[in-house]
C-alpha cells in the first residue's frame, strides 16, 4: 500500500492542513531556525501530519497527534549542506498537534516559499512508490509531477538507505514522508535538481530529521 501526496492547488498560507509553503503552525514557544553555515533564516518547506487518527487520509494536521515541520536553508542553495540531516542546513521539528498557531516570520532572508500548496492523499494498493505514482497518473489523467511524494510507507531511495538514527535514543527513526521537488517552478523545492526529500521522526523522543538525495 502506498499513500500518495498529490497537488491540491493553492491554499491559505495559515491553513491547518498538510501543505508545502505558507506560514508554519508552531507552538507558543518557538524560535525560527537559522542555518548553521550562513546564519540566515531557513525556508519553511512543509508541515506533515504524524500519528494522527485520519492523518493519512484527511490532509488535516489539526487531528494529528504530531506535526512534522520541515525547514531548509535556501539563502545560498548548495552552499550550506542542506541535504544533510545533521549539518545544520535543515531542520525538522516534531510538534504536538494541539495548540499550534502561525509563526512570526523573519523579515530577512529566504524564509517563505513562493506558493502555499495544499496536498491531497490517495491510497493505492501498489507497494512500490514509483509504480503507484504511474498508476495514479494514468487513472486520473494527471501529470506524474502532480504527485508530490508519499506519506509513511517505505522510502523509495534514490541512493542508498540513509535512515537516520534518533539523536536522543539512537534507534532508526520512523519514516514520515518522501517529498518531490514540486509541481512547477513556483512551488518547487530545491533538492539538487530531480532530488527527493526524506522526512523522519522519533515520536517518543520528540525528534525530527530531514535529508535529501539526488
Ligand atoms: Zn545557509
Ligand atoms: Zn528517539
Image: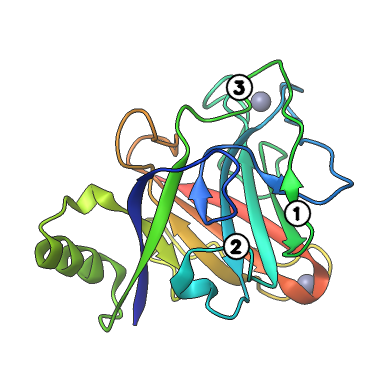
Q: Is mark 2 within 8 Å of ligand 2?
A: no
- Residue named by callout 3: 110
Can you tell which of label 2 and label 3 is closer to the viewer? 2
In the picture, the quarter occupied by the N terminus is: bottom left
Q: Is mark 3 on a helix, strand or loop?
A: loop
* Residue appearing at x 50%, y 50% in the figure: 19
Q: Is mark 1 on a helix, strand or loop?
A: loop
x, y percent for residue 152: 49, 72
In the picture, the quarter occupied by the C terminus is: top left
Instruction: Examine the rendered structure and indicate whether residue 56 appears above or below residue 157.
Output: below
Circle 1 Cα neighbour tier, 10 Å, few/some/many (<14 / 14–19 / ≥20): some
How far apart, in angstroms, are the residues tagged by discs 3 and 1?
23 Å
**Pointers 2 and 1 in contact (C-beta within 8 Å):** yes
Is 161 in front, or is 168? 168
x, y percent for residue 194: 32, 41
Q: Does the residue labelled 3 lie within 8 Å of ligand 1?
A: no
Instruction: Examine the rendered structure and indicate whether residue 76 appears above or below residue 22.
Output: above
- Residue named by callout 1: 100
Residue farthest along the right direction in this orientation: 29
Can you tell which of label 3 and label 1 is closer to the viewer? 1
Circle 3 Cα neighbour tier, 10 Å, few/some/many (<14 / 14–19 / ≥20): some
- Residue named by callout 2: 61
How far apart, in angstroms, are the residues tagged by discs 2 and 1?
10 Å
Residue 16 visible to an observer of this rendering: yes
Is 104 in front, or is 41? 104
Answer with the quarter of the image where residue 40 lies.
top right
Q: Earlier in the sequence, mark 2 or mark 3?
A: 2
Q: Which of marks 2 and 1 is nearer the N terminus?
A: 2
Q: Is residue 165 left or right of residue 142?
A: right
Label at residue 52:
none
Amino acid at each position: 500500500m502506498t499513500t500518495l501526496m498529490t497537488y491540491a492547488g493553492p491554499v491559505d498560507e495559515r491553513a491547518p492542513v498538510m501543505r508545502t509553503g505558507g506560514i508554519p503552525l508552531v507552538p507558543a514557544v518557538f524560535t525560527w531556525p537559522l542555518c548553521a553555515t550562513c546564519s540566515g533564516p531557513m525556508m519553511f518547506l512543509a508541515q506533515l501530519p504524524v500519528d494522527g487518527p485520519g492523518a493519512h487520509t484527511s490532509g488535516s494536521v489539526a487531528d494529528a497527534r504530531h506535526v512534522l515541520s520541515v525547514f531548509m536553508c535556501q539563502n545560498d542553495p548548495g552552499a550550506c549542506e542542506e541535504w544533510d540531516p545533521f549539518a545544520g542546513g535543515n531542520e525538522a521539528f516534531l510538534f504536538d498537534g494541539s495548540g499550534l498557531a502561525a509563526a512570526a516570520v523573519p523579515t530577512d532572508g529566504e524564509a517563505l516559499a513562493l506558493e502555499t500548496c495544499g496536498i491531497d492523499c490517495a491510497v493505492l494498493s501498489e507497494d512500490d512508490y514509483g509504480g503507484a505514482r504511474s498508476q495514479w497518473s494514468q487513472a486520473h489523467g494527471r501529470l506524474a509531477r502532480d504527485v508530490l511524494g508519499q506519506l509513511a510507507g517505505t522510502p523509495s531511495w534514490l541512493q542508498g538507505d540513509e535512515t537516520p538514527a534518533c539523536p536522543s535514543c539512537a534507534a532508526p527513526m520512523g519514516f514520515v514522508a518522501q517529498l518531490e521537488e514540486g509541481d512547477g517552478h513556483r512551488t518547487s523545492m530545491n533538492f539538487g535538481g530531480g532530488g527527493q526529500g526524506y522526512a523522519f521522526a522519533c515520536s517518543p523522543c520528540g525528534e525530527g530529521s530531514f535529508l535529501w538525495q539526488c
